[in-house]
Image (cartoon, grey):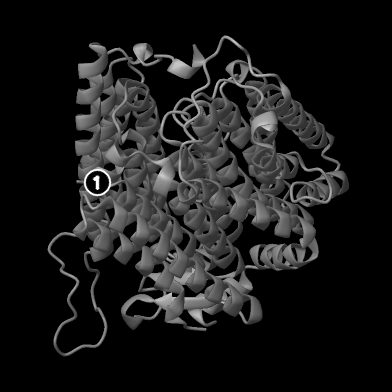
């Protein structure tokens, strides 16, 4: 399981970096989404994946007797997913507005001079 | 010591924003609420500051769970100073916004978003949990996205794309760093991390993680070579927004760098050298960028970058004197940079443009306002005994003791270029005769006295604070000395949070 996740994270980071380096705005957006997801899976992986061991102390004991699934990484990922959802939806609307204004997807065309500079 | 009062500044801004949302489209009520809220926050942050100054580091634990399991808020000397400065800057900006921001922007929620932004800044300065710091950073950037794009002009949106792309990337780096940090230590509390990081067997992975934080915070604080988003976005929004951004947003990145690289990662010689090279390059590129700009706000944007280099240099030297100089510079910089962007907004009100060749004759038209602005510009340049002068002595002294002559050279070049561009700005904007062909669009003169006061008063408040910092340097140095002691000896911070 860990090995699959390691490869998945690698592929997602590589694809994300490749897409961000392109000049197209849509690819930039997709790249940031992929990088964000790769990071979320990284948190998941580094929190030590444990299967079928909920973090609940058994009734007769005061401490954990066995290894347990760490709940903190899941809380972190959930927070990170919500945040990146908000940011991504803002980014989509922003890029759509920019596309409507300048009629191109090319990031190199984002240099309209200010009226005051002319 | 546990004191729940430190969280009040965050709560005040949160509730100001929420109450303003209830008065959607009632711009007058929002303006009054904004100034009142910022004023109350200023009082409470001053109380926090006084408590920390007179006592020791204060903490607040969420839901009274013991640290390191709960999220802690920590007000040590550095945090409480920055919260106080944020409050002063926020009050000035909210007064200025009452007239300086167009009604159309206010109708679309300028004030609530502004208060959410300031809330995020306060939270970031106060939190003692690394993941919580990430969340506050996200609060800050989403608010700043909205403030930057509010109004929807073409140049604004174009600037916002660059700003958004690099800031989202910075957050990803930061989050990746947190993930690895949690993987190797199993904790997120910064004080606890400070104890656990030295125990990690493989220190090379610790150094690698620190680079993730360096890149993430480096983008946010506009350090070379990651600053390109700043000059291409800061000149686009209204001046009140640019003032908040220029004065406070890059500084929160610097605060995070200081916190992370003194408390969690103690930098080795290699990272110190990297920081020093970055500082020197930041100073030089910022300075040379400022020389060629004709738009006042673009010029100020490059000056921000140049002076960020001074502060990062102080961090890189990593001695008590260097920290004192860097923190003093940070204090001075927040006040002056906020004021510079407010001034650029005022100049636009007076003349209808911010392009230096088209400006002129302001001193003849408005001698009193010009003198007020001169005080700020002199402080920026660092004419003794004003506030920009004292931290530079400390930085020079620290660099001399460490034999870092390249950094001294960069400091001198940076200071001289600042002097040159400010002299150019003064002669172009204030002394030069106004050109006869250019029609003057003075939208300041027809305003009533009440509105005029609202525009000039915040600049006066900030200029007075700058004067106070410069003329009471002894007091500020006592504060910065204590800050640098606390930064170098993390024991007091750890003891305050963990109680051991």
Looking at the image, which residue is at 27% across and 57% down?
A: A76
Q: Nearer the viewer, residue B32 or B60?
A: B32
- Residue B350 in percent (x, y) is at 54, 32
Please rate how many residues cluster around mark 1, counting C-alpha atoms within 10 Å: few if below 14, some from 14 to 19, many from 20. few
In front of the other: B275 or B87: B87
Horizontal relation, residue B348 to residue B364: left or right? left
Q: Position of residue A41 (x, y in %)?
A: 25, 45
Asked if residue B202 can be seen in this view, the reply is no
Residue A6: image x %, image y %?
Answer: 28, 40
Is residue B306 placed above or below B254 in the rendered structure?
A: above
Horizontal arrangement in the rendering, residue B246 relative to residue B116 (left or right): right
Picture residue at 39% right of the left edge, 77% below the top: B61
- Give the quadrant of residue A84: top left
For label 1, the SS is helix
Disc 1: host chain: A
According to the picture, the residue beneath numbered tag 1 turns out to be A2
For the point 35% across and 73% down, the residue is B70
In the shown orientation, is residue A87 left or right of residue B292?
Answer: left
Residue B326: horizontal and vertical position, in percent?
70, 51
Which of the 4 quarters of the picture holds residue B420? Answer: top right
Left or right side of A107 for B331 = right
For the C terminus of chain B, the quadrant is: bottom right
x 84%, y 47%: residue: B384
- Residue B120 seen in the current view: yes
Does residue B153 sit above or below B256 in this rendering? Answer: above
Depth check: B109 or B102 in front? Answer: B102
Count of numbered circles in the view: 1
Question: Residue extending furthest bottom?
Answer: A60
B176 or B286: nearer the viewer: B286
């Amino acid at each position: 399981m860990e090995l699959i996740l390691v490869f998945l994270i690698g592929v997602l980071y590589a694809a994300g970096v490749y897409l961000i380096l392109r000049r197209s705005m849509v690819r930039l957006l997709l790249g940031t989404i992929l990088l964000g997801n790769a990071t979320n899976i990284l948190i998941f992986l580094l929190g030590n994946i444990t299967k079928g061991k909920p973090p609940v102390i058994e009734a007769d004991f005061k401490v954990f007797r066995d290894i347990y699934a760490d709940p903190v990484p899941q809380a972190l990922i959930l927070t990170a997913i919500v945040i990146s959802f908000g940011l991504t939806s803002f980014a989509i609307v922003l890029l759509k507005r920019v596309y409507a204004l300048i009629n191109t997807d090319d990031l190199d065309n984002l240099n309209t001079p200010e009226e005051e500079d002319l | 010591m546990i004191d729940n009062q430190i969280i009040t500044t965050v709560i005040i801004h949160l509730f100001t924003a929420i109450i303003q949302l209830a008065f959607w489209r009632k711009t007058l009520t929002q303006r009054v609420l904004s100034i009142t809220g910022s004023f109350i926050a200023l009082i409470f942050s001053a109380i926090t500051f006084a408590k920390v100054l007179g006592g020791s580091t204060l903490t607040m634990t969420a839901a009274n769970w013991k640290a390191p399991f709960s999220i802690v808020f920590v007000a040590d000397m550095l945090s409480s100073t920055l919260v106080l400065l944020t409050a002063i800057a926020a009050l000035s900006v909210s007064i200025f916004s009452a007239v300086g921001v167009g009604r159309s922007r206010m109708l679309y929620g300028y004030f609530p978003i502004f208060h959410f932004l300031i809330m995020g800044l306060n939270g970031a300065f106060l939190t003692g949990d690394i993941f919580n710091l990430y969340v506050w950073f996200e609060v800050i950037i989403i608010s700043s996205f909205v403030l930057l794009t509010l109004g929807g002009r073409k140049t604004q949106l174009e600037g916002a794309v660059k700003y958004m792309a690099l800031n989202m990337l910075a957050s990803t780096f930061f989050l990746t760093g947190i993930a690895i940090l949690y993987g190797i230590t199993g904790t997120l509390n910064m004080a606890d991390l400070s104890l656990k990081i030295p125990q990690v067997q493989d220190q090379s992975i610790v150094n690698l993680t620190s680079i993730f934080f360096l890149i993430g915070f480096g983008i946010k604080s506009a350090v070379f070579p990651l600053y390109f988003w700043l000059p291409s976005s800061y000149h686009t929004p209204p001046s009140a927004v640019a003032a908040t951004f220029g004065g406070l947003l890059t500084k929160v990145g610097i605060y995070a760098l200081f916190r992370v690289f003194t408390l969690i990662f103690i930098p080795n010689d290699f990272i110190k050298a990297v920081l020093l090279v970055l500082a020197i390059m930041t100073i030089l590129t910022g300075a040379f960028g400022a020389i060629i700009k004709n738009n006042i706000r673009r010029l100020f944007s490059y000056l921000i970058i140049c002076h960020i280099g001074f502060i990062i240099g102080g961090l890189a030297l990593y001695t008590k004197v260097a920290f004192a100089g860097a923190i003093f510079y940070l204090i001075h910089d927040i006040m002056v940079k906020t004021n510079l962007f407010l001034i650029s907004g005022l100049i636009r009100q007076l003349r209808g443009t911010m392009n230096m060749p088209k400006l002129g004759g302001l001193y003849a038209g408005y001698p009193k306002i010009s003198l007020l602005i001169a005080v700020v510009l002199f402080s920026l340049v660092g004419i003794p005994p004003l506030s920009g002068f004292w931290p530079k002595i400390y930085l020079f002294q620290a660099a001399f003791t460490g034999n870092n002559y390249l950094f001294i050279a960069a400091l001198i070049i940076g200071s001289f270029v600042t002097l040159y561009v400010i002299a150019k700005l003064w002669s172009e904007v204030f002394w030069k005769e106004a050109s006869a062909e250019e029609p003057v669009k003075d939208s300041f003169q027809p305003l009533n006295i009440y509105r005029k006061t609202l525009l000039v008063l915040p600049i006066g408040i900030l200029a007075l604070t700058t004067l106070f910092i410069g003329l009471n340097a002894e007091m500020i140095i006592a504060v910065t000395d204590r800050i640098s002691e606390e930064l170098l000896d993390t024991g007091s911070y750890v003891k305050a949070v963990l109680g051991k």
